[in-house]
Amino acid sequence: MIKTLIFDFGDVFINLDKEGTIQKSIQLLGKDIITEAKRSNNQDLFKINDAYEKGKISTQQFLTFYKGLAHNINESDIIFLWNSLIKDFPLHRLKFIENITNTTPFKTILLSNTNELHINYIKENVSFYDTFKSCFDAFYLSYEMGLRKPDNEIFQYVLTENNLNAKECLFIDDTKENTIAASKLGINIWNINPKKEDVTELFTLKQELF
């Protein structure tokens, strides 16, 4: 029996524009710069982004790295580009999690790979962020934890910290590598497809788990 619901944030509650952000990155930085950065053995984009989402580097260090990729961009350009990933937060999803909190016995946890710039942007642009956050029994952001999905340690931390039985948990995330990692620990999963499914359909689409 499922007793705990563990939710991702991006493309589960708040919509993201991943494809559009990639195209904007190419337009601002140039395709050659992005390709070369990915080939670097030291500070490639993936390592920098990973380190930033784990809180291993500061926002200023993150911005300085990106400024070093192209001399014709400034910090405001980078921040605008970085935050363009974040789109809208449909109100019906807030109502959904509020309903779970107020009318069901489920323990609710949010587990998100994110960073300081994105969270600050969300706080400034989502008027009900505090209300949303208050719906959860635990609210985990990767850059505050020093851990990141799909690393095994982050799931183990959540299970241990909250005294959870993996078989009694359901983890909802749009990234397949994250749900695969969770499933290896015995956690039930829903690898949600944000283009076809909505988290508010949870109890309909995954009724066999409840």
Image: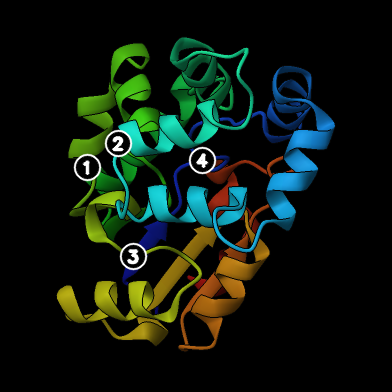
Q: Are marks 3 and 1 in contact (CB under 8 Å)?
A: no
Label 2 element class: helix
Residue type at mark 3 is Leu
Label 4 element class: loop
| Residue shown at the point (30%, 14%) measured from the top left | 124
Tell me, for residue 147, which label it has, or none: 3
In three-dimensional space, the C-alpha distance between marks 4 and 2, rounded to whole angstroms, equals: 18 Å
Q: Nearer the viewer, residue 129 or 86?
A: 86
- Upstream in the sequence, badge 3 or badge 1? 1
Q: Is residue 166 above or below residue 73?
A: below
In three-dimensional space, the C-alpha distance between marks 2 and 1, rounded to whole angstroms, equals: 6 Å
Q: Are marks 1 and 4 in contact (CB under 8 Å)?
A: no
Residue 75 placement (x, y as % from top left): 45, 16
Q: Are marks 2 and 1 in contact (CB under 8 Å)?
A: yes
- Upstream in the sequence, badge 4 or badge 2? 4
> Circle 4 sits on which residue?
10
